[in-house]
Image (cartoon, rainbow, N blue to C red):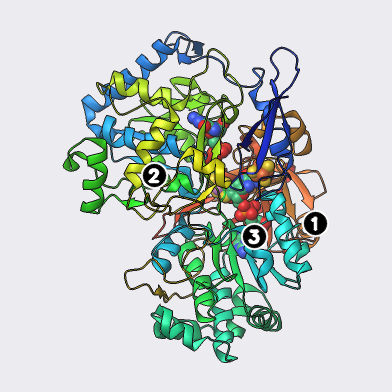
Amino acid sequence: MHTTATHCPYCALQCGMNLRPAAGEAGESAVEVVEREDFPVNRGALCGKGRTAPALLSSRVRLTEPLIRTHATGTLEPATWEEALDAIAEGLGRTRRAHGPDAVGVFGGGGLTNEKAYALGKFARVALGTSQIDYNGRFCMSSAAAAHQRAFGLDRGLPFPLEDIPRTGCVILVGSNLAETMPPALRYLTELKENGGTLIVIDPRRTRTAAQADLHLAPRPGTDLALALGLLHLVVAEGHTDEAFIAERTTGWEEARAAAMAHWPELVERITGVPVPRLREAVSMFCTPSSAMVLTARGPEQQAKGTDTVSAWINLCLATGRAGRPHSGYGCLTGQGNGQGGREHGQKADQLPGYRKLTDPAARAHVAAVWGVDPDSLPGPGRSAYELLDALGGDVRALLLMGSNPVVSAPHASRIEDRIRSLEFLAVADVVLSETAALADVVLPVTQWAEETGTTTNLEGRVLLRRQALTPPPGVRSDLHVLHGLAARLGIDKGFPEDPEEVFAELRRASAGGPADYSGISYRAIEEHQGVFWPCPEDTPGPGTRRLFLDRFATDDGRARFIPVAHRESAELPDADYPVLLTTGRVVSQYQSGAQTRRVPELNAAAPEAFVEIHPRLADRIGAVEGAPLAVTSRRGRAVAPARITDTIRPDTVFMPFHWPGEGRANTLTNPALDPVSRMPEFKTCAVRVEPADAAAGS
Ligand SMILES: Nc1nc2c(c(=O)[nH]1)N[C@H]1C(S)=C(S)[C@@H](COP(=O)(O)OP(=O)(O)OC[C@H]3O[C@@H](n4cnc5c(=O)[nH]c(N)nc54)[C@H](O)[C@@H]3O)O[C@H]1N2
Ligand SMILES: Nc1nc2c(c(=O)[nH]1)N[C@H]1C(S)=C(S)[C@@H](COP(=O)(O)OP(=O)(O)OC[C@H]3O[C@@H](n4cnc5c(=O)[nH]c(N)nc54)[C@H](O)[C@@H]3O)O[C@H]1N2
Ligand code: SF4
Ligand SMILES: [Mo]
């Protein structure tokens, strides 16, 4: 039977899978997933989300026709595509005419293919002329991206393929729960240990991932910066620095060294709660073998000091010569399906395609020439994601949203929900009626992964081809069709093609010569090489650049830059009113805001609702009972979810997954304090009060 080789619609591992026609009932998906063993990243393995992804193609849960809010009843009613696109062009156009182009905002997502992300950025700058565009990737890897840029002059999450992990001597995994967030990738850590390498996991919770570690450090949330500095202090004190590497391949060591030396192990123990002997053990495990890696994920990054924290981890790698060498280095585990590509081609507030800077005159000239517009007509950088959402209903009066569900996923979500409700006009393109789409004036039902072709760039920087396997239902159109149709209605009849390969051809030209150079990549080459690693310039087509920085870093002088950083506290610390720390994250069976996975019966049965993970000692103190509702209150609001009592978490910390709306919405509580460099919100640390919900009812 005919099968189509493609990739999972969810996370950044972008597991390969085959789809084949299935005999289902009317309204059910017409394809099923079968193993695709030839794809090297996952070698056939899939998590439950990937395996069940076709369930979302079923017309029982998805949107199948456009919806327009009627004035008379205030409800969303079916409409034709012509009517819906007319209404959006009219809504956005009216706001622009009355209040100027920056009164119209655009919000994108790291799940969008490269073609869509590119077209959306171009649509904002060329068709709308607005600077007010950003996307949910700001909530995801922006701190690691900023730290990458300042140290190495380039941001590709992993500068090496995953297959290098089992070949290194030691991996420090900081704030990643890979066993739940990228299950097939756990194999790389198992192979590392089989090969005699060691694994250190840093997480305030003893997660399924931490359970695999040779050494698990459980710091107080929000203290990874001090922890990394303490390790660097010990590296220096114990003579583990690589002086030749520092002299030949880096700059700025003296200042960074001085900053680290102020962080005595005893001080670091006091800040983090990690005992000094454990710090020494970690240093010994990291420095003894001839190669080692540090990998970070959202734990240390989603902090108001995430950028400095990642810089501290990079400093540790540079000081020990564990960067720019085989099987060594720093990497960030990017999260969303196209989290990497989505941050390269222009949906970010300060960016043009090819990872170019919007403020760079040469970049503006290059991209404007590809777009056939005057460079001076391109707007400047806009606001970051939270700042943009926070400005809705203020000077940003209308919004086009594609690929995100901020009512559930934005920090201080009750405020953001209010801001969204106060918009004069909201248009949402989605595959389901998400909590945010439900607030829109116009909702457009769009095609999904298996129904369209496009490229994504996985966490290794490997550009992949997702191929269409089946015909979409009649009422559904692609995101590219949406942008094409809206541009035409705004008076631009060229430059927004609907054919993804045509968009990719233009993306290649726009990215040519930029840091993320895709000009040598074609759909054919991707298929031939099982993905192409960027940069891949036109004059050297082929499999691309698997490993970066082995000869030089991407800075002007080719040297990596140490950044001097010092510990600082989280934006909010526990006090008498809010004595407990809340941290947030994920469970294996739900994805992000849950808009998609909550609609897949098998996944929803496995993880039906939010919960509060709490240590038995804290549970005893407040009278929490397993399974009974707990009220969690922060300065921003109150959430209620059942208690899950477990000694795998620190007694001073509770944990909530963020996949649910309503009462259990973790983001009602989270603090939108922003990192000064990356503008990343502090999703992973805020102060809360925790009590049985019945006791809290009156307070
Ligand atoms: N099942 C599932 N998989 C996913 C996703 C999903 O929603 N569901 N989303 C995808 C996306 S977009 C992303 S970004 C990735 C995220 O992947 P991960 O980063 O692995 O996911 P999280 O659960 O957010 O956070 C990881 C760990 O950080 C820990 N942590 C919390 N606070 C701190 C801290 O202060 N310091 C340290 N060191 N650790 C801390 C948490 O306890 C948690 O175990 O997952 C991707 N994969
Ligand atoms: N408290 C807390 N909050 C967090 C985090 C955390 O760790 N803690 N993590 C943050 C992180 S890392 C992330 S990445 C964000 C993610 O949070 P969101 O941005 O809300 O991500 P999703 O739930 O994936 O939303 C994607 C939406 O787009 C739709 N969609 C999927 N594919 C397409 C497509 O091709 N086109 C269109 N038009 N729509 C599509 C989906 O149905 C869904 O409604 O959440 C952030 N929020
Ligand atoms: S690990 Fe990620 S890419 Fe792989 S099947 Fe699961 S959700 Fe899909
Ligand atoms: Mo993410």
Q: Position of residue 285 (x, y in %)?
A: 69, 79
Give the mark, 1 or 2, whose residue is nearer the N terminus. 2
Local secondary structure at mark 2: loop
Q: Quadrant of the C terminus?
A: top right
Q: Position of residue 279 (x, y in %)?
A: 66, 80
Local secondary structure at mark 1: loop
Q: Amino acid type of disc 3?
A: Glu
Q: What residue is pinned by disc 1?
A: 646
Q: Position of residue 366 (x, y in %)?
A: 24, 46
In the figure, 97 relative to 291: above or below? above
Mark 1 and mark 2 residues within 8 Å of each other at the beta carbon: no
Q: Amino acid type of disc 2?
A: His
Q: Amino acid type of disc 1?
A: Thr
Q: What residue is pinned by disc 2?
A: 345
Q: Is residue 22 visible from the viewing direction of this image?
A: yes
Q: Crowding at label 3, few (<14), some or many (≥20) Cα neighbours within 10 Å?
A: some
Marking on residue 163: 3
Which residue lies at the image location 78% right of the left edge and 56% below the top edge?
619
- The residue closer to the viewer here, 223 or 450, is 450
User: Which of the two marks, 1 or 3, is nearer to us in this view?
Assistant: 3
Using the numbered discs, state the Cα–Cα distance from disc 1 to disc 3 in whole angstroms.
Answer: 34 Å
Give the mark, 3 or 2, whose residue is nearer the N terminus. 3
